[in-house]
Each structure stands twice: as C-alpha cells, then as structure tokens.
Image (tube, rainbow, N blue to C red):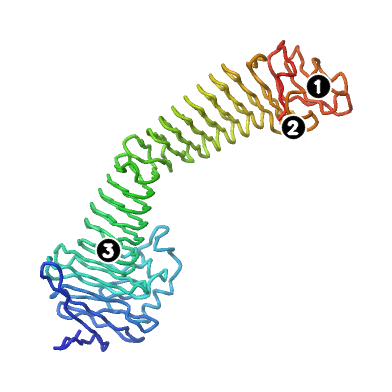
Amino acid sequence: MTPNSTTGSLIDGAEVVSSLVDMIAGAKTKLIQVSAIQSGRVDDTGSSLFADIPLDTSEGKAALLAKLAEGSGLLANIHTVDGQFDPTSNITREDLAVLLARILKLEMFKPTGTPSFSDVAPGVSDWTVNYVKQAVEAGLVNAVSSVELTGVASRDTILNGLPTYNNLMVLDASSDGVHRRVEINNVGFIALKGVADIYGGNGAQFIVADGASQRIVMGADDDTMHGGGGDDYVGSLGGNDELHGDEGNDTISGGIGNDTLDGGTGIDIMYGGEGDDTYIVDTASDQVIEYRGEGIDTLRSSVSYMLENANVENLVLTGNGAYGYGNGVANRMTASDAGSVLYGWGGNDTLWGGASRDRLYGGSGDDRLYGNGGNDRLYGGTGKDRLEGGTGRDYLAGDSGNDILKGGDGHDTINGGSGNDVIYGGTGKDILTGGTGRDTFVFDTKLGKGEIDTIRDFNPWEDTIRLENAVFTNIGPKGHLAWNAFHYGTHAADADDRIIYDWFSGALYYDEDGAGGAAQVQFARIDKHVFLTVNDFVII
C-alpha cells in the first residue's frame, strides 16, 4: 500500500479509497475500499507498514471492504504450490483458478468426509486449513484474502464484504497475543487463527476457529459457527443457525430461531432459546437448557440420555444410545438401530423402535408405541394406549386402560391386560389374550395355513370376534352374523353355513359357500367347549 495525503491510495496499482469513521467511546476506525484487481497481477508480500489485499473477481467489481482500527497492520497472502494452501506466500488470479477448479467436495458450506492434510503446506494449522481448503476446492467463494490482526486491543476491527459475493477471509490474530474484538459483515466464509471475539453483523456467514478458546456471536441471519479446539463460547442473536463447539468444554447459545446445537467432544452446555431447536449430544455429561414455551425441541444423542431435567420434547437415540428417558410432557422418542430401551414416563408419548430389538414403555398417559423392525417388547402402561409391533416376533402388553394392540407382521404375542381392548393379530400365527374386560379380537388379514391365531381366554359373555368382509368375502352384510350362518361341527352342514366351530378341538373355520365345493379355511383357535352363538361374531 502506498499512502498519500489525500483519500486515495494504491494497492499494486489498484485505486483505494479510505476514510476515518468515529466509533463508540471516541475510537476511530479506517474504512478501506479496494477496487477489483485484473487478471495476471501478482500480490506483494505485506508487512507491518504496508497492506496487501488480493481481491480478484471475474466481474470487475470490488469484492471486499475492510475496516481496521487506526494503526493496525494488514497482511493478505494466500498461495498454492502444486495444489497446496499456504497463507505465507502470494497468489495470482491464475493460482486461484487452480483452487477453484478442485470443486464439488462440499455442499452449502458443510464439510463432508474425513479431510486429508496431504495437500497442506507445512507449519499451517490443520483445523483452519481444513475448512479453508475445502471451501476453496468446492468453488464456494468468489474472492480469497487473509488479514493479520495487529494493533491496539481496545479498538474494534470491522470487516465488511459485499452481499453479492461469497468471500473467503483468513483472520490471523495469533501474531501479537492481543485479545481483540472483530465485527464481520457479509464476508461469507471466515477462518480464524488465534484468539479474538468475533461478532457477526449482516449476512449469512460461515466461521471456523482454530484451536484457541474463542468467543463467537453471530447476527440475525442464518449462520454456521465452529468453535474449533479450546473451551469456546458460540452464540447467535437470531436466525436458523448451526452452532458447533467442536473440541473442548464449550458453551453454546442459539438465541431466536430454529437452531442446531452440537457441542462436539467434551462436556458442553447448550441453550437453544426460542424456536424449534435440535441438540446433538455425545456424552451424558452434556447439559441442555430449555425453558417451557420456547418451541418444540429435539435432542439427538449417541449415548443414553434422560430428558427429566430439560424441557425438550423429542429424543432420538443414535449410534450406541441404549436408554432413553422422557419427562412429564408429551415426548416423541426414537430408538437407535442398534437397539434401545425407551421410557416415556408421564405425558401422552409416542415411542418408535428401530431396526433391532427394542423395549418400549409408555408409562402413564395415552401413549403410542411402534416397534418397527426387530423382535420388540411394547408395554403400554396406564391410559388409553395404541401399540403396533411392526415386523418381527413382537410382544405387546396393553396393561391397564382401554387399549388398541396390533401385532403387525410376524408371529406375535399380545396381552390386552385390564380394560376393554381391541386386538389385531395381523399376519402370522399370533397368540392373543384379552385379559379382563370386554375385549374385541379383529381378523382383517389374509387367510391361510400360516395365518391361524390362538385366542387363549375368549369369554362369549363379554368378548367379541370381528370379521372384515373384505377378507371374509361371502360372509354376509355388516352387523351380527346371520342366525343361520353359524354351525357346530367339523365342516359345514348346508349352503348357509359360514362360520364353523369344532366343539372338541376349539378350531374356527370359514367356508365361503357352506356345503358347496369350496374348501373351508381355519382362521383361529379358541378353548374347547365354549358356548358360542352368532352374537359373538360381528361383520365389519
């Protein structure tokens, strides 16, 4: 930079306009606007006296505005040698093109996969370089620059990008050990080395910090923050943000908006604030803080977790998450695919099993339990519960209350418990027990040799068998079975008989044409010597 006595300056021949801005408490800040640099220009190496900002763009517009405290130095260097990133060398526009050509390794500023550091120049921090390198390789930025922060700690540094550009800036705050405050606006992608308090203003921005302990607070747009190593404070004033503590014992605050909070490794404290937030937990020592009325929140945990002390509604277990415990509100809980035990406790809960063997306990309240895959065990508890086994050989217990229990696919065992229950065996050879109360057994799946259910405690004075007319296609109109359609014996006696009960074996048969040529099909078995009548059968 070649300063002169007027407002004009030159950076490698490009015109610069600067002005002083009065800040709070009498501080002064210099606003620097740099014009775009044309193709082929080589950047000078900056120093403590001179600044150099490579801001190449394809449209010939200024890509970045920089505000720095008076007396601050400015260093802007980035270079590639055989694909390497090195913030101590120079870059041409052609060098940048080499980086931008290595594209499509990220989507929406989110790094994927395991980074390789084989292309990183020696002596450069892996954490910062990881995100810088990947963002550049993905073609997510229109301009690249770096700034070395020096000067007086009491003076704010303000960096402004243009909203129409995705700028990438590397902030180096490690040179003098001074802890300073930096405000960023519309910069796009920021990588921080060293210690600084970062405050975001306008624009949706992505910031990743190095291994030091940082304080990062972004503005009202949809931002992404990575604290990096160290014990960080990562927060936001608004917007639907992604906040990552990464390594260390971090404190994360989402503010207003539907945020995702991920503490990373270490013992973290996470506060979502208003909005429907999502928490990522990897240790039972992580603390989640939510207050009532702040939205419908979800906690995703790879370890066993209790919602008892957090006003969080939804719990999703992942990985090795073995046990999940609800609280007094209406929880929605999901087991991991490795197999989990879920306790709903109070409230009207919804519990979902995974692909393996799960145990689901509804507790008190009117709960819904779904086993999904695997051989599951479902316990409704008190209240009017709905239990569905899904696939597999499941066990369903309604316990107390008027429950609905559906076995689903597989050979299931179902016990209604006390109350007036409705029991569906589903497909397979199921064992059904109504328990006390007026229970209903529903047959609404295909008939066949492998589809014979056993009812262990059918009481003709209290219980009912319902037959789906889409399956029992010629059984007659809806309502009670016709008086002449029921027969005691081993087979139909005349053309009107449809349901046949074998008094000596307990077998129940359906015959679609009575004494005609069609073969009868057994669909159930009850106790022997039960006094059945047509009133025990209802067509639906």
Q: Height in image: 469 above or below 535?
A: below
Q: Amino acid at mark 1?
A: Ala
| Label 3 close to label 1 by CB (< 8 Å) | no
Residue marked by disc 3? 200
Who comes first in sequence, dot 1 or dot 2? 2
State the residue in front, 106 or 36: 36
Q: Residue at x 19, y 73 (%)?
A: 68
Q: Amino acid at mark 2?
A: Asn
Q: Could you say where residue 387 lies in the image, as x and y percent from the top left?
A: 54, 31
Tell me if I can see residue 359 in this picture.
no
Quadrant position of residue 291 = top left
Circle 3 residues within 10 Å: few <14, some 14–19, many ≥20? many
| Element at label 2 | loop
State the residue in front, 56 or 248: 56
Q: Height in image: 15 above or below 493?
A: below
| Label 2 close to label 3 by CB (< 8 Å) | no
Circle 2 residues within 10 Å: few <14, some 14–19, many ≥20? some
Who comes first in sequence, dot 3 or dot 1? 3
Tell me if I can see residue 360 in this picture.
yes
| Element at label 3 | strand
Quadrant position of residue 13 = bottom left
Residue marked by disc 1? 485
Q: Could you say where residue 35 lies in the image, as x and y percent from the top left?
A: 29, 84
Q: Could you say where residue 364 lies in the image, as x and y percent from the top left?
A: 44, 27
Quadrant position of residue 150 = bottom left
